[in-house]
Image (spheres, grey):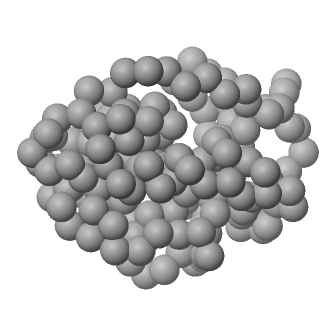
Amino acid sequence: MTAITQEQPTITAAPNPGEAWPAQGGIYIGIRVTPGGAPVHLVAAIGAHEIEDAEWGPYGQSIKGATSYHDGRANTQAMAEAGSELATRVLALDIDGHTDWHLPSQADAHLLAANAKHLMQPDIYWTSTQYSANHAWYQYFTSGTQLITSKDCEFRAVPVRTIQIDL
């Protein structure tokens, strides 16, 4: 897997969760902590940039590097390298000049459900976290649950990005 290094912006002030964040490409979702203990802001491109009726892909293939609970960017890159059209589409996005979009990890999806469930469609959305060669995790916003299903099902996807917090 080829690592793509992209400089992360550093920002300290943010709006309230659920509010648009001007010049950041979407809606501010909140703060989560990385496994290393670093806090990051989560921004989601809710609405016009969501992708509908997409397969997680590729079914029957275990993708090395796409199983992180926290690192949606690494998961999405691994998916794209393995041929996922969904991941390729999300990585190609340029919203407000930001090109660091990815599919939400399970941790990102939990934060979306906690702070922005009311802004999401009452639908199923993919996470970037693979469960097995045939299954991946999804977030169901109607009930707030996360479950696994077949990678060849067609669901929605919301692009997200993280921003490091300068302490």
Compared to residue 35, the image places residue 27 above or below, namely: below
The extreme bottom residue here reads 122
Instruction: Report the residue at 63% width, 59% height from top.
Output: 44
x%, y% of residue 154? Answer: 27, 70
Residue 28, horizontal then vertical, whole percent: 73, 58
Q: Is residue 64 left or right of residue 60?
A: right
| Relative side of 37 to 79, left or right | right
Seen in the picture, residue 69 relative to 97 is either above or below; the reply is above
As drawn, which residue projects farthest toward the right?
13
Residue 142 at least partly seen: no
Residue 102 in view (yes/no): yes
Residue 59: horizontal and vertical position, in percent?
14, 50
Quadrant holding the C terminus: top right
Q: Residue drawn at (34%, 74%), measured in percent from left and top?
A: 53
Q: Is residue 91 above or below residue 9?
A: below
Q: Is residue 67 above or below residue 52?
A: above
> At 60% from the left edge and 48% from the top edge, which residue is drawn?
101
Rendering quarter of residue 123: bottom left
Q: Nearer the viewer, residue 8 or 27?
A: 8
User: Residue 63 in the image: x percent, y percent?
Assistant: 24, 33
The residue shown at (37%, 21%) is 1
User: What is the tally of numbered marks visible in this picture?
Assistant: 0
